[in-house]
Every structure is written in structure tokens, then in C-alpha cells.
Image (cartoon, helix red, strand yellow):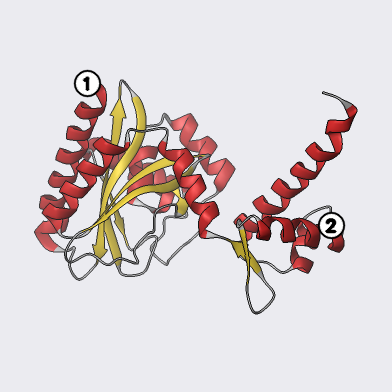
Amino acid sequence: MSQNDEPGIKSAGRSFRILETLIDAERCTVSELTEQTPYTVSTVYEHLSTLRDLGYVLKEDDKTYRPSATLLRLGTRIRRTRVPERAVRSTVSNLAERTKQVVWFTIAEHSIAVNLYKSVGTEGIQTFGREGKEVHLHCSAAGKAMLAELPDDRVDAVIAERGLPAYTDNTITNPDELRAELDSVREQGFARCDCETVENVRAVGAAVAVDDDTVGAITVGGPRSRLQGDYYESELPQLVVEHANELELRLKYQ
């Protein structure tokens, strides 16, 4: 690397630092970003202007900045290189057709659940969990299904790294309660989310593993008023597990 390359690399590093801070905060003013980074107001403003020109950042009327849809799509495309799109989309779409609800294929990245693919059934609500949405593992059906595939020491490491923040009053925030929940998930082969991520939204999820490597999880979610009784307790979990098993076979032998 020549000395002439260093200014450009340092500048790119500043842009990434500012962008990562903005993504974590979701929306910030220049002053707020200055407080959260080691850069001056003029430096933050200059880099935001460049990122805005490139289409990665949007400036709102209230003078706050937020990540653009272009940036979100870029991240989603990168993540999709990890699993074959055709097989996953087909399975997710089939399950959405069977259940008439919203179905996601979710991966774990840096101990966070990320919705990678989504299909909306005829009675599903489009706004539920956009593609690219991130949530903590402990509060979603997909997240708990993937956590249950990990040994106890890895689970403890995730708890130490990410904590157990409350998304709703139903979110499990006690480590011992989460460990007990994961034991149940391992025993029954699927996980439930009873309004733990979003109020009045339930979900059922099952992990997808290929050769002992957990590649993600399939989840069906919908309003609590629709996911209840025997359907929520037994019929829906059976459908989710069947489709997770089907996807495992397709990914293994494709």
C-alpha cells in the first residue's frame, strides 16, 4: 500500500463508521452523530453529503438523516449469497399459501435475527417484518429456534453480547427463563413467539439445518386473533416443521 492510498482509506473508514452509527440509531441529526463518533461537525456533514449523493442516506425535512432503501437492499443482496434463493423462496411461498399468513426465512448474523425472505399469504398483513428487518434472537420465534440449536455456552455468549432487551411486556428478559424456553424448543422441535416482539402478534418458527449447520429458520406470523387455539398449539407448528424439513432436504441434495 502506498502512502498516497492512506487518505482515501481513512476517509472510507470515517464514512463506514458514520454509516454504521446511523444504521444502529436508525435516524440522527448531524449533532447527534458528532456526539456518537470521534469526528467534528464539518467532517460528519461532509461524509453524510457524500453518502446522500450516492443514495445510501436520506435527509428528512426535520434535518435528520436515515439509511436509504438502497442501502437496505444492498445488505439483503449480500446476505442472500449465503442460501440458494430459489429453494428458499419456493418453500416460503408454499407455506404462505397454506397458512394464508406472513412467512419469513430468517438468518442469524452477528447474533441478531435478520429477515431474509418474506411471502405474504392472502390473509397476511404486508407491514409485518419487512425483508432486512433485524431483531434480537431471544424475542422472536425464528431467533429462539436458531438459539436452541446452539450449545449452552454459545447461548450464554449471545446473552452476554446482546443482552435480553424487552420489546414488549411478554419478552423474556431473564436468562434462566430463556434457557428453560430453549429446552422446550429443543424438545418439541419448534419455537413460539407469543407477542414477544410486537404487541398482539404471534409466530411459530423452526430451524433449518444442513449437515449440522443451522442456515436459518422458517416462521409463520400473524395477529393473535388468528393464531390461537389448536391451530396455534398444534396444527401450525406441524406445518412449519414439515416445511422446514422439506427445505433442509432441498438444500442438502440440490
Density class for disc 1 (Cα within 10 Å; few <14, some 14-19, many ≥20) is: few
List the residue tagged with mark 2: 43
Density class for disc 2 (Cα within 10 Å; few <14, some 14-19, many ≥20) is: some
Q: Quadrant of residue 247?
A: top left
Three-letter code for the amino acid on which mark 2 is drawn? Thr
Secondary element type, mark 1: helix
Residue farthest to the right, as pictured: 3
Residue 87 image offset from top left, x and y in percent? 24, 35
Residue 196 image offset from top left, x and y in percent? 37, 60
Residue at position x 67%, y 59% from top? Answer: 53
Residue at position x 19%, y 45% from top? Answer: 240
Mark 2 or mark 1, which has the lower sequence index? 2
Three-letter code for the amino acid on which mark 1 is drawn? Tyr
Q: Is residue 235 visible?
A: yes
* Of 27 and 146, the residue lying toward us: 27
Q: Quadrant of the C terminus?
A: top left
Residue at position x 31%, y 41% from top? Answer: 217
Residue 209 image offset from top left, x and y in percent? 30, 29
- Give the tally of numbered discs: 2
Seen in the image, is 9 located left or right of residue 3?
A: left
Seen in the image, is 150 located left or right of residue 221?
A: right
Q: Is residue 96 above or below residue 45?
A: above
Q: Is residue 137 visible?
A: no
In space, the residues marked 2 and 1 are separated at their CA atoms by 52 Å
Q: Quadrant of residue 249?
A: top left
**What's the mark number on residue 253?**
1
Residue 237 image offset from top left, x and y in percent? 17, 48
Q: Is residue 136 above or below residue 124?
A: above
Q: Quadrant of the N terminus?
A: top right
Secondary element type, mark 2: helix
- In this view, the mark in front (2 or 1): 2
Residue at position x 51%, y 53% from top? Answer: 72
